Amino acid sequence: MKRRCIVHIDIDAFFAAVEELLDPSLKGKPVIVGGLPHERGVASTASYEARRYGVHAGMPLRKAYQLCPNGIFVRGNYQIYKTFSKKFFRLISQYTPDVEASLDEAYLDLTRCRPLYCSFSRTAREIKQRVEKELGLNVSVGVGPNKILAKLATSQAKPSGFFEIRQGEEEAFLKDLGIECLPGIGPKAQVILRMLNIHKIKDLWGLPRASLRSFFGLNGDELYLQSRGIDSRPLVVASIPKSISRETTFLEDLWDRRLLLAHLAYLCDRLTLPLRKGRLFAHIIEVKVRYSDFRTEARRHLLLTPLQEMEKIYKVAQELFLKLFSSSRLSLRLVGVKASDLVRARPLSLFEPYSERSERLGLAVDEVRAKYGFGSVLTVREKMLESLYSFEKKRGYVLKTASLTK
Ligand code: TTP
Ligand code: MG
């Protein structure tokens, strides 16, 4: 199997670093985020200056105050940290689709993108530089052939450094690290191993797998592999939903074709929002109707080139809808639209010129709506719903069923 290239990246003293960015007068001072000194609770982050006093995440605030009375204590604002986290994720996702991220750290698997990069090391350094420049936060970066080695490399790089484990260097890198560095070794395991005079990772190499298993059960196997830098776990990449749908039951059964199409347009509009957000394209568009006699029918269309854009999806949906509606003499109770067979990236079409125009338009509409509310951009068709439903600036029309929000 080819050697993989995993980049691990972790923001330094994340919450505290954001606080320093918001209030530059805090720079270089011992900042402790989590609450005020007299409050209950624990510190969630300590800046590196505060760590010099022995303060660390998880420490009760009172204790932190005793150790560092001149520390600057702030309660913190999770919403703001989350915004930085999202920006962080968006930026690193430009380098590979294979990203496993949590709040302030991420693994990137560059292996599949080999043809794009002439040197993985250089790309990893570039990612570090760009995150630091565009987010204004220092990060530490580790590069290795799997998750565990990349993460251990990052801890060597902290704070604000870069560390790469090259092929053949694994053993030399691991041997003198303390056993506490391995994620599989908690405080209890440490006590047991230290009693056996095992302090460094190389000391673990002398223990047979069976002994580790007898001490730690299945975790023993894990430990055996971890201590040798063996780790074949894939990244846990955010999964793609199976389908996304929006539907509504009308206040009264509807017969008016234009009004029905107005509902359909609005549902398509709502449907494309999560598609754009998740950068998803749909191969299947399905329309469902329920007639006044409760009979339900659906029709679907399979698309060779998957779609994300509202107008295009609406066109397909309209055609499907009209086929269903025209063949019946009944009024309708419900209409719904569903996008399924979702893919993350649109395959390039052989016969159409490549254009991102409509995708950009969609994103621009989202931005305007985020700022001025959903109702700031509506199609003429959607406007027809004004006479039927109350309108909330942020949420748009409030249709009868809750399914819009699912
Ligand atoms: P970490 O990455 O563990 O810590 P850090 O970013 O503060 O410092 P460094 O990586 O340089 O060692 O955690 C990221 C954020 O998660 C941290 O800023 C605050 C939050 N956090 C808590 O809320 N509680 C905790 O116990 C820990 C460890 C972190
Ligand atoms: Mg961190």
Image (cartoon, rainbow, N blue to C red):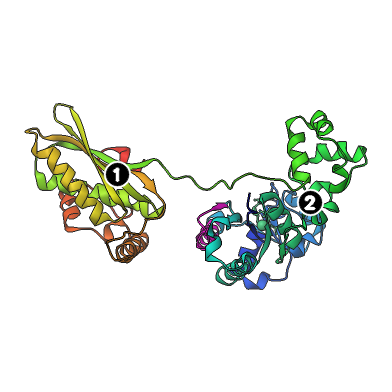
Could you tell me residue 212's position as x and y percent? 82, 34
Q: Which residue is denoted by mark 2 in the rendering?
A: 63
The foreground one among 18 and 155 is 155
Residue at the left extreme? 329
The foreground one among 322 and 300 is 300
Residue 290 against residue 302 in the figure, above or below:
above
Q: Residues within 10 Å of mark 2 (few under 14, many from 20)?
A: some
Could you tell me residue 14's position as x and y percent? 64, 59
Could you tell me residue 42's position as x and y percent? 70, 49
Q: Magenta residues, as a range?
A: 82-100
Query: Which mark is on residue 270?
Result: none
Q: Is mark 2 within 8 Å of ligand 1?
A: no
Q: Is residue 347 visible?
A: yes
Asked which secondary structure carries label 2, the reply is helix
Q: CA distance from mark 2 to mark 1?
A: 58 Å
Q: Residue at x 58, y 56 (%)?
A: 111
Residue 80 against residue 261 in the figure, above or below:
below
Q: Is residue 255 left or right of residue 39?
A: left
The foreground one among 202 and 135 is 202
Foreground mark, 2 or 1, reads: 1
Residue at the front extreme? 1
Identify residue type, mark 1: Ile
The foreground one among 306 and 130 is 306
Q: Quarter of the picture for ligand 2?
A: bottom right
Asked which secondary structure carries label 1, the reply is strand
Q: Residue at x 19, y 38 (%)?
A: 250
Q: Earlier in the sequence, mark 2 or mark 1?
A: 2
Q: Which residue is denoted by mark 1 in the rendering?
A: 284
Q: Is residue 256 left or right of residue 105?
A: left
